[in-house]
Image: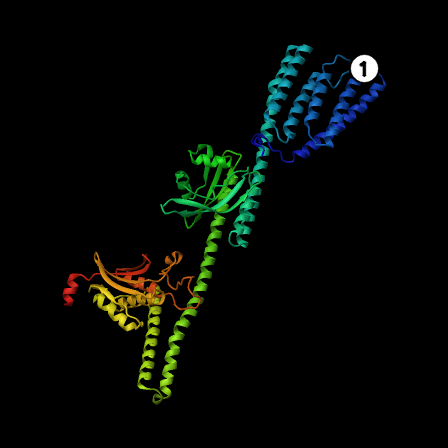
Amino acid sequence: MDSSRGLALHRVDSYRYRTAALITALLGASLGAFSESAEMMQGEPGSWARFAAFAAIGLTAGYQLFRERRTEGLLIVTGAAFGLLSFVEVTQMSGFDSGITLALLILILVLYVSTREHQSRAAVIVGSGLTALYTVAAVIIEDPPTSEAVGRLLVGIPGQVLVVWITWRLIRSLAEANRHEAETARIQQALATCSHALLAGRDEEPLSAALQALLDATEADYSYIDVNRVDEDGRVTWEIVAEATGVNVPPGPSTFDDGDYSQFPEIIDTLAEGKPARLRVSDLPMPIRGRYEAEGIRSELMAPIMIRDQWVGTLGYSDFWRNDAWTAVEIEGLMRAADMVAAYWERESAREGLEELALAKDRFIATVSHELRTPLAAVVGFSGELAEGLDRYTREEIFEMVHLISSQSIEVAQLVDDLLTAERAASGNLTVKPTVLDLFDECRSVIDSLRLGHSMPVEGEAVKVWADTLRTRQIVRNLLTNAHRYGGPQVRVEVTTRDDHAVLTVTDDGPGVRGIDAEHIFDPYYRSKSEDTKPDSVGLGLAVARQLARMMGGDVVYRRRGGWTLFELTLPIAPAHAVAALV
């Protein structure tokens, strides 16, 4: 990358202007040389000098016309030829007097300013100085009248400077307008490409395509998209999820795939407010400045990705050559692109939510069908056998079938109870009627009614709680059923107190819940992805248990301690006056 490009004035269509100037010079010089050749044949004095000047100008113009089409050499040759010929002491040198030559030198400077593609101030200053020097020399050599000398000096020194300066400013303004228009067009095209990529693609591929389009439309060297995280210490961190790299990035380490904003408090505040942030590496303190310098980064431009007024990530540019030279068009384009990424993330999140909802619905229907079909098959089968004839079975067999019909009917009733409870809770029609009850006795009663096939001793003490009897039994039933279904062979139940709450702890020696599932086990209809694909649970038991407990002023929590899985139910202890009234 050219480090001096910031001093250059880019000329739109300057190639066409130079071509026109060279053709004009070639035609004019050819006409002049043809005219002077006739004068030479007639022996006119000084014609040979004029012919040589026109020939030099024509050859230079022709050479540049068929080569690089530059105008510098032509302007230098023309200025030198006319300047020298104007001082030659020969007769009939019309067209080469000092006044016309001065005007020609000023015209040459104007042409240089107008046609030079990458123009520096030094060349213009040198050209103006030589024109002024020629003016002074012509006045001294020719010694014209005072009024004419003053006029030449005014035209040749401040006059030519003013003309060149006005031309310079005009061309500079036009070039800046053209540059701004071209840059705006590039950014608009890049945003259109971003929009198309984000609308048509999925996952991270459209993000990379959008970043590459933005990078191609700017003078930045690297672009990226990161998402915000919060670590264990509460610090805001970033993690890059997509990037695009330009051809001008110098070789070096890449250590910014992730990091934290602890050393950029002002940038955090700016981005959190939804505003773009600019970072100049030279203004950063150590050691973070050293980290940027090791990669060669000189400045960054960042736009926040906002979703529902929350800063969730950043879209940014990194520049390895410019020192915070971001234009207003680049900033505005980056902000609009950040809005597009935010909309893309929202759409993807909604799509994933709909897909998950559809899968949850399918799992729910399959699971409920399984949960109902199994006990109903037993009820229908055994009741049919009994209806066809009792005399075929012994008393013990009849008792066993009736027992199975009863237990399976209870299981169906419990599932329907959970479904109705979840539906009422979702519609806001679920109510509780607290009263005084003994949590210890209720636990033993529920265990006896479940008939799980093995004993679950209840340890602890009798505790009076202020809760709804029916809902408390439902919570205890769901916790015990969960431990029996997913826990290990050893299940313990304990009733204790903690401050002004009673605590019922159901403990088993099963494998527990994976960390990723622990955050969702209390969500309605959630089932761990690590479970058997065969549906065996609706996923409502724990969700209903926690919802009912919280409605009664308590809670249900999951813990993992020393190889044991614990589910704790807390309920408020009954107030003394309520217990006394009951007694």
**Residue behind mark 1:** 45
**Residue 243 in view:** yes
**Residue 155 in view:** no
Check the image and tell me how it is coloured.
rainbow
* Outermost residue, right side: 42
Q: Quadrant of the C terminus?
A: bottom left
In front here: 132 or 231?
A: 231
Q: Position of residue 197 (x, y in %)?
A: 55, 51
Q: In which quarter of the image is residue 7?
A: top right
Residue appearing at x 31%, y 85% in the figure: 395
Is 570 positioned to the left or the right of 526 in the image? left
**Which three-letter amino acid code belongs to the residue tagged 1?**
Pro
Q: Where is residue 142 in the image (x, y as percent from the top left)?
A: 69, 11
Circle 1 residues within 10 Å: few <14, some 14–19, many ≥20: some
Q: Quadrant of the N terminus?
A: top right
Is 240 positioned to the left or the right of 381 in the image? right
In front here: 387 or 403?
A: 403
- Compared with 137, 321 (above or below) is below
Residue appearing at x 21%, y 57% in the figure: 500
Q: Where is residue 14 in the image (x, y as percent from the top left)?
A: 65, 33
Residue appearing at x 64%, y 29% in the figure: 114
Q: In which quarter of the image is residue 358?
A: bottom left
